[in-house]
Amino acid sequence: MSEAGQTVARKSFSGQFSPEAQEAIRTRALSGNWEVRRLMKVLGELAHFDEVNEKKTRRTMVWMIVLYVLSFLGIFAAAISGEFLGTNLVWLLPPAMLVLAIWQTVLYRKLKKQDLINDFRTCLRPVLRDLANDLDPEQKLRVQMDLSGPVDRKKTNERPAPPGNYVKGKEHTFKDPWCEVRLPLVDGATAVLQFDTTWIRLNVTKRNRRGKTKFKTKWRKECVARATLMPPEAVRWDEASLQARMDPRLEKVKLVEKDGVMCARMERFWRFKGSGDAPGDAPPGREVVGLLLRLHGAMMPSTEVGS
């Protein structure tokens, strides 16, 4: 976040949230080792901030558009009413509307700089809430989250847009491995959740039948949730069960070795589309929890296989 954006956040939200939440709002990131309850409290604060900020952003955008339209229409209104009223004071109305519109534009950009990725509150938070009873309350969760979304520093590729029905276009790709959470479970196993997002922004210029050009922005959001289950000791995995419960169109599963113990990993893919702003859709939390449940159901003690 820019220095100006950090200053606005500090002045606007100091005292309303915990110090940890304020720091996450300023940096748009959250990391470290956390107790379950403390992490859920901070995520709740961030979710409240993000919802309020989104409402303010939408309201500011509406006022910005209305004021720009009024400043344009005010020119004609001033010309008509000026002749009727016999005064030039009405000509102050259009520039006043324009100044207000510019002020709303500046405010809109500041609010956008404070925006957090929706996935943490619509996906990760429900996942942690569903798994709360399965987490070891004596152990801490290891968290690494980047909540900034598709910002310029994550841009990995820029190229001409694929052929289409438009005059010109450019495609931008953003790689965003935004979250990794390490979860200690009550049975001694460890679950690791990783969320990777690829944002693809397409800026195109189209020309309609009347010869007028229009600029459009289209988004594609490709999400991958990866669940890894690490048992506390050597186990055997029912690979046939894993394969039978997997949707090969959207999911992958494989066994990986960590510290001499065989672990299982399952990942699932989602795709969302939007226009204008980046899509706020996220993987459903229940489907992410389902990845871990299927992995846990395929885990067998090594003695059980040999019998």
Image (cartoon, helix red, strand yellow):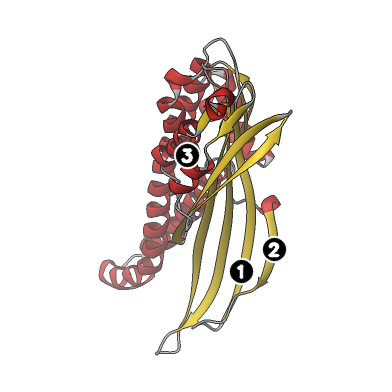
Q: Quadrant of residue 259?
A: top right
Badge 1 vs badge 3, beta-carbon distance below 8 Å = no
Q: Name the residue tied to disc 3.
A: 291
- Nearer-the-camera pick, 59 or 74: 59
Name the spot of residue 57 as percent of width and height, x first: 44, 46
**The residue tagged with tag 1: helix, strand or loop?**
strand
Which residue is painted at 52% across and 43% down in the image? Answer: 117
Amino acid marked by disc 3: Leu
Which residue is painted at 49% across and 80% down in the image? Answer: 206
Badge 1 vs badge 2, beta-carbon distance below 8 Å = yes
**The residue tagged with tag 3: helix, strand or loop?**
helix
Q: Residue furthest top?
A: 138
Q: Please say whether residue 209 is visible from this viewpoint.
A: yes
Amino acid marked by disc 1: Glu
Q: Name the residue tied to disc 2.
A: 157
Q: Please say whether residue 145 is visible from this viewpoint.
A: no
Q: Earlier in the sequence, mark 1 or mark 3?
A: 1
230 relative to 280, above or below = above
Amino acid marked by disc 2: Asn
Name the spot of residue 205 as percent of width and height, x first: 53, 77
Name the spot of residue 188 as percent of width and height, x first: 57, 17
User: Would you call the spot at circle 3 few (<14 residues within 10 Å), some (14-19), or many (20 or more)?
Assistant: many
145 relative to 129, above or below = below
